[in-house]
Amino acid sequence: MLRFAFFDTKAYDKPAFEKYGPKNGIEFKFFETKLTPDTASLAHGFDGVCVFVNDRIDSAVIDSLAEGGVKLIALRCAGYNNVDVPYAFGRIHVVHVPAYSPYAVAEHAMAMLLTSVRRVHKAYNRTKDHNFSLSGLTGFDLHGKTVGVVGTGKIGRIFIDICRGFGMRVLAYDKFPAKDTDIQYVSLEALFEESDIISLHCPLTEETRHMIGEESIAAMKKGVVLVNTSRGGLVDSKALLEGIKSRKIGAACIDVYEEEADIFFEDRSGHIIDDDTLARLISMPNVLVTSHQAFLTEEALENIAETTVGNILGFFANGGHENELCYRCGNTDSCKKHRVNRCF
Ligand code: NAI
């Protein structure tokens, strides 16, 4: 039996992992705590760790895991900006789940957009209180509006299809534009200038960090609606708040927040929120916040567990897996994936 230490466990994680793990020879030991330098020693003696978006796998954690005999870091998510992948090279192998339900995320982005522009969240609260007034609930048609999509990978493309279904004009920007497509690519500057709605679907990298900041917000249309279901760090949240306060940004729908690690996924009701920017954003009538839940559908949870178990089995039984992450992949001299099925 392979033994995996499962960090940052939530109740919704267990059913699918308990379904796919034991029958495939993997025992998951569920820890509620996140993986940090302080908790890494809990994984000593395990074959691997299974981690999520807000576990912090920095050099100190990687050293501790390696020292404790851990051989594999299995991310149960797609994004890996929380893992020091270059540092892990040569020390511990890392696998991830490249796609589990791009539909879940794209559909959530549209759900947030519709909720925001048609004030559904306000109407819901009002009618619960038998308040049937319509004042302040005027929205606008999505039909005919221009949406700017940043990142046209799996999720971005599905979001584009959904927007087209609504009769919207779609502009897109991608650092690596798709070739076999009728997507209309424009420069990032043109996208900021022309879009009524901007939706982010690119990864968080050093290059994309704060791509939405003071300067880019200044270049946008007045009243623009920003949707971020990708990663919080893409948006400078202080600049976003200023944009809301100055009325430049008409509405913001955010499923991710740059300082979300200690807040999102937790029940913080009854606690004082120390993050003034987040507290102020939440207090705004035109800001909709969900707690990194865009991925959270039954289909996605099943796929995550099934793929993660496949990644683990592939690594231990077959010597490697196509879902291994490595910053040297493609460099045939230093990454061995093409020869031995493992990156090092
Ligand atoms: P993907 O890898 O299929 O697509 C990402 C796209 O971004 C690619 O087309 C790539 O060329 C493009 N890109 C890379 N660098 C760029 C840059 N500097 N500027 C513009 N575009 C750039 O990824 P996928 O599956 O579509 O996911 C997108 C993002 O969604 C992920 O990076 C992840 O952070 C986020 N995500 C959020 C979830 C949530 O629950 N809120 C769940 C799953 C993913």
Image (cartoon, grey):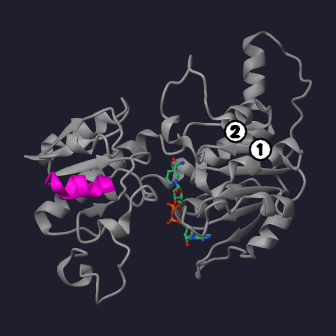
Query: Is 117 displayed left or right of 44 in the figure?
Result: right
Q: Is residue 36 visible?
A: yes
Mark 2 = which residue? 277
Q: CA distance from mark 2 to mark 1?
A: 7 Å
The residue at the point 47 percent across, 40 percent down is: 296
Query: Is 219 displayed left or right of 164 in the figure?
Result: right
**Mark earlier in primary sequence (2, 1):** 1
Q: Is residue 310 visible?
A: no
Q: Are marks 2 and 1 in contact (CB under 8 Å)?
A: yes
Q: Give the vertical position of 285 relative to 48 (above or below).
A: above
Mark 1 = which residue? 241
Which one is in front, 294 or 142?
294
* Residue 41 drawn at (x, y percent): 21, 43
Q: Give the vertical position of 30 relative to 71 (above or below).
A: above
Which residues, given as a range, are shown in magenta?
60-73
Q: Amino acid at mark 2?
A: Thr
Q: Amino acid at mark 1?
A: Leu
Q: Where in the image, quadrant-wise, is ligand 1 located?
A: bottom right
Mark 2 surroundings within 10 Å by alpha-carbon count, few (fewer than 14), some (14 through 19), many (20 or more): some
